[in-house]
Image: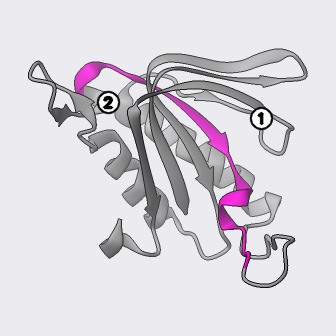
Amino acid sequence: MRAVIQRVTHASCTVDNQITGAIENGLLILLGVEDADTQEDMEWLANKIVNLRIFSDENGLMNKSIQDIGGNILLISQFTLFAQTKKGNRPSFIRAAKPEKAKPMYENMSTLLGTLLKKEVQMGIFGADMKIDLRNDGPVTIIMNTKDKDNF
């Protein structure tokens, strides 16, 4: 799994002119799933996300997690995180999991994050043409890859 995690003051997802999810103060997470991903990958990533200390404390230092601040999450499926651009100019997405695997994992990640945060996670619509609005706070953007845990 790959995730791009952005600390935001607000974020929303719109599909067909309808807002499917919106948050204030929290994390916008773009999530990519590949065929090799497992439940273990999902659990590792979810626990890492909710415990990341990337929110400011009273001294302006990044010492607080999303749990500490009572923040929210907007989770968006993003197969393009597995784009391969080595050959030519047209990306290949062959490493991205097919929808029959990716969609349940995306939904399960939402449930797991919600359980850990003890609140509902806002979502986009899997496979839809989504429009994402956000205000990155900081900016703080973290990239994580469960297949390369030592470097992330």
- Secondary structure beneath dot 2 equals helix
Disc ID at residue 139: none
Q: Report the residue at 87% width, 16% height from top.
A: 17
Name the residue at the left extreme: 59
Q: Amino acid at mark 1?
A: Ile
* Magenta segment: 68-85
- Among the 4 quarters of the image, the one containing residue 18: top right
Q: Is residue 75 magenta?
A: yes
Disc ID at residue 125: 1
Query: Residue 67's spot in the image, x, y percent?
Result: 28, 29
Name the residue at the right extreme: 16
Q: Nearer the viewer, residue 10 or 104?
A: 10
The relative height of residue 37 versus residue 60 in the rendered view (above or below) is below
Query: Residue 109's spot in the image, x, y percent?
Result: 54, 46
- From the image, tell me which residue sits under label 2: 66
Counting other residues with Cα less than 10 Å from the Cα at mark 1, is it few (<14), some (14-19), or many (20 or more)? Answer: some
- Secondary structure beneath dot 1 equals loop
Q: Report the residue at 35% width, 65% height from top.
A: 152
Query: Residue 137's spot in the image, x, y percent?
Result: 41, 27
- Among the 4 quarters of the image, the one containing residue 50: top left
The answer to whether 125 appears left or right of 39 in the picture is right
Query: Residue 55's spot in the image, x, y percent?
Result: 27, 30
Q: Amino acid at mark 2?
A: Ile
Mark 1 or mark 2: which comes first in sequence?
2
